[in-house]
Amino acid sequence: MKQLLPDPAQFRVNGRLWIEGPADRFLGIGRLELLQHIRTQGSISKAAQAMNMSYKRAWELVSSMNTQAREPLVSTQTGGQRGGGAHLTEAGVQAVAEFEALQQRFQEFVTQETARLRG
């Protein structure tokens, strides 16, 4: 087969991975990062700040994921003596783990296809 690329060593396969539901994106790199920040920060607003994202946008993303999932991924608690906060539910922890594993397999695929492209 004739080589299509002038210098295959200068090219690589690349892409982004996400999971789509019937009406909206369910989970991708940005939403994964948001969930990871919620897990470590214990707050949607702090997670949004860490990502330079508005609280409104972060809340919309969390709401979208919670609505689409069989069980909510994030649980929130409003003010009170201990203050408000958010944490990942068991389903949220599972979703993060499964998407991270999927992302790892995708990166392995990209690496293999880049090697194949370069011959």
Image (spheres, grey):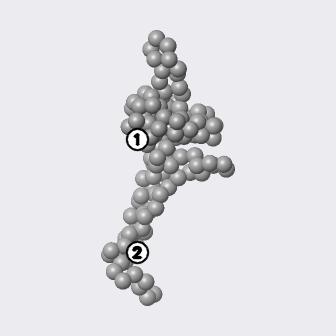
Q: Using the rendered view, name the quadrant where residue 38 is placed.
A: top left
Label 1 amino acid? Asn
Q: Disc 2 marks which residue?
A: 117
Q: Using the rendered view, name the quadrant where residue 36 is placed.
A: top left
Q: Is residue 69 visible?
A: no
Q: Can residue 25 be seen in this view?
A: yes
Name the residue: 38% across, 69% down: 12
Which quadrant does the N terminus fall into? bottom left
Name the residue: 59% across, 33% down: 72
In this rendering, the label closer to the viewer, 1 or 2: 1
Residue 81, horizontal then vertical, whole percent: 46, 11
Name the residue: 42% across, 58% down: 107
Pick the residue in front: 19 or 100.
19
> In the image as oriented, which residue stretches furthest toward the bottom?
2
Name the residue: 63% across, 41% down: 68
Residue 29, horizontal then vertical, whole percent: 46, 49
Pick the residue in front: 79 or 32.
79
Q: Is residue 107 left or right of residue 78?
A: left
Which quadrant does the C terminus fall into? bottom left
Bin the neighbour count of mark 1 within 10 Å (Cα to Cα): few under 14, some 14-19, many 20 and up: few
Q: Which of marks 1 and 2 is nearer the N terminus?
A: 1
Q: Disc 1 marks which residue?
A: 52
